[in-house]
Structure formats: C-alpha cells, structure tokens
Amino acid sequence: MLDRTVSFLAKDLAPSARGIDQARRIPRTILQTLTDIGVFRLAVPTAQGGLGEGSQTSAMIIEALSTACASTAALVSLQHNFIVASLCGFGSDLQRSTWLPRLANGEALGCWALSEPDAGDDLSAHVTTATIEGDAFVIRGAKSFVTLGGEAAFAIVFAKGSGNKDLTAFLVPTDLPGVVVGPVYETLGLRGLPVVTLTLNAVRIPKANRLGEEGQGAMIIAQAMDGARIGVAAIATGITRAALDLSTQHALRTLSEGAPLASRQEVQFKLAEMSTEGDAARMLYWQASSLRDSGMATLAESAMAKAIAVEAAGKAASHALQILGSKGLLPEASVERLIRDAKNLEICVGTPESLRLAIASAILKD
C-alpha cells in the first residue's frame, strides 16, 4: 500500500494541498482516492471488510500523507485512532457490523465530540447529559471544536448519565432531529479539516447506541488519546520531512555570492538538524506504535513521540522559512502552511506541558 500511497502523493495530493488549505475542505475526489487505495480500510478488522493493520503501519501511512498535506493526514489519523479504534475496543457486535464496513469503504466518516465550550481536559466540568426517557437516551448539550462535525455520518459523543459523574460514550448519527451544526471555525492550521460546534437539542438515540459500559467514557478517551498521539507524531514527522525537502531543493538551486546556498555552513547546520530531529521523532513513534501493536500500555512513549515530533516540526518549518527567505512568505512556497500546521499540532491531543506531566508520572510510578 505504501507504494500506491506515494504514487497518490505525487499525482494528486501534493498539487492539491494549497487548494485544500485555502478552501478549508478536502475534495471528495481526494477522499475517493484514499478509499480506492485502501487507506480507510487499513485499521478496520478483516471481519468487517478491512485490512486489519496495526498502529505502526497506520502511522507510516499518515507520515507519508503529511509530507504532502497535513490536513489529509490528520483526517486519516482521526478515523484510525479515534473512531475505528474506539469501535473496535468498545463497540458491540451490532455497532461494529453497522459502522466499520461503512468506514472501511469510505461511505462514512466519524467525528469525536468531547470538548465543551466551558470544559476541555477537565472531564468533571462537562455538562452534556444523557438521560433515559422511555426506550431511548436523550442527549442535551453542546460540543465545541468537533473536527468534521458537519461532514461525518456519526459522532462519538461523551455525556453524563443521570446521577453519574463519569462520562459515557454514545454513537449519535448526525442526521437525527436536534443535531445542529454550527459555523466552521477559522483555525490557524490544518485548515482542510472543518471544525464546528455540535449542539444536541434533546437528541433521541436507541439504548443500543451506548458505546461501552456506563461511566466508561474516560477509559475510551484515554485509549484513543494514546493512539492519537502516535498519529500526531507521525503527522509532525511528515511536516519535518516536507520542510527538509523544500529547504534542500532551494539551497541546491539558489546561488548566494556566486555559490549554491547549500555550500554555506549555517544552512548545512539547519539541514542537518532537521534531518536528525526528524529521524529521532520517527524512531520514537515507531517505538510507541510497536509497543501498542503488541498490546502494551504506551502512555509515556506516545507522549514522548508527540512532544518531540511536534517540537521538531515547528523548528524545521522555522528553519525552512529562514532558508527560503522572502520566498518562504508566499503561499505557493508551502512554508507558511507548514508553520501553521505545525503550530496547530502543539495543542492537539495534549499540550507540551500536559505531555511532560504524563511522562513524569510514568517515570515516578516506575
């Protein structure tokens, strides 16, 4: 599959990346090509029409996609690490047979509805509720910063049940009465992924749509975040590769005082740093994904991978701007998009500070 993905990058994705960023939407043709080459089938078990591949293969594909378009890579990571992983880990037989084949064949996308206008990481502060009324759950509340909320066929929504302080997860089809999609946020980076608010006005869903057990939401979130940090590390590593490639090409073909820019020591130092830190980031996410595929906990490893990879991406994009100079300020050079995308990744699935706390906690526990 990696060969087919590389061919797709050169033919379709890379030339479309700037347009995706400007239009704030990934074209249906790109999604169809991803479907055709099997990217959406990758993480889905073979029993539901997928390829049954693990976290490491997924991350490698995500990195490859990110070298061309980080928004497209982030969409794939969202489907693999939040949606498919949660259904595989906690879904009932009915839920898996209903949604996983549709995810595998590109017929449906899912979204993750966790954050609220006045609550983020503090799960105890969430106020969305799911009450039992007759033969159904009725969900009331609002979820903010929902990626693909206006395009997904269903949302994994987290809410508190009656008399239960712990969150429970629910599968909510987005075409149900009472689901209201807000305007698209104008985000700094990863602009190809529309981010919206989802308001749930007394949305009725069958009791069979509860994902996992009552009060199990925090466990579902933790497992998804673990995998998602590996995905973000892979996206960031792809940005570093893209920045290095752009910088190298420019340095080799641009003259400075009669000699190639690449002959200047300060430029060589920046290229060496980009290459070294990009490889280090890749090794960290390979380690984390390998451990995850073997069934081991990866709280510290995925946090390390995400923290280092995102820092490397930010530095690489900044170095690329310095090497390209004024040309790097122009949208057609792609550097300013790399800078914005790298910055956006800093707060995805854990800020640098929260990641360091997670790593320190694992060290102290040992």
Image (cartoon, rainbow, N blue to C red):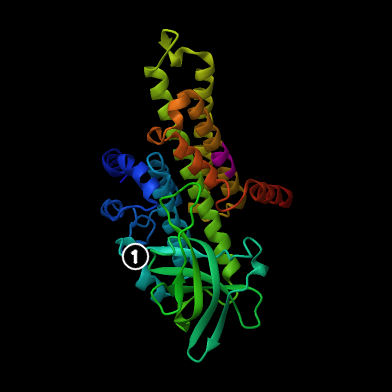
| 188, 82: nearer the viewer | 188
- The span shown in magenta is 307-311
Q: Residue at x 52, y 56 (%)?
A: 295
Q: Farthest residue toward the right?
A: 364
Position in image of residue 145 (x %, y %): 52, 60
Helix, strand or loop at label 1? It is loop
Seen in the picture, residue 231 relative to 136 is either above or below; the reply is above
Q: Is residue 308 magenta?
A: yes
Seen in the picture, residue 93 relative to 357 is either above or below; the reply is below
| 116, 37: nearer the viewer | 116
Position in image of residue 65 (x %, y %): 38, 44
Q: Amino acid at mark 1?
A: Ala
Q: Is residue 94 visible?
A: yes
> Left or right of 139: which side holds 260?
left
Q: Which residue is mark 1?
A: 108
Q: Residues within 10 Å of mark 1 (few under 14, many from 20)?
A: some
Q: Which quarter of the figure has residue 144?
A: bottom right
Q: Is residue 286 visible?
A: no
> Left or right of 365: which side holds 285?
left
Seen in the picture, residue 277 relative to 223 is either above or below; the reply is above
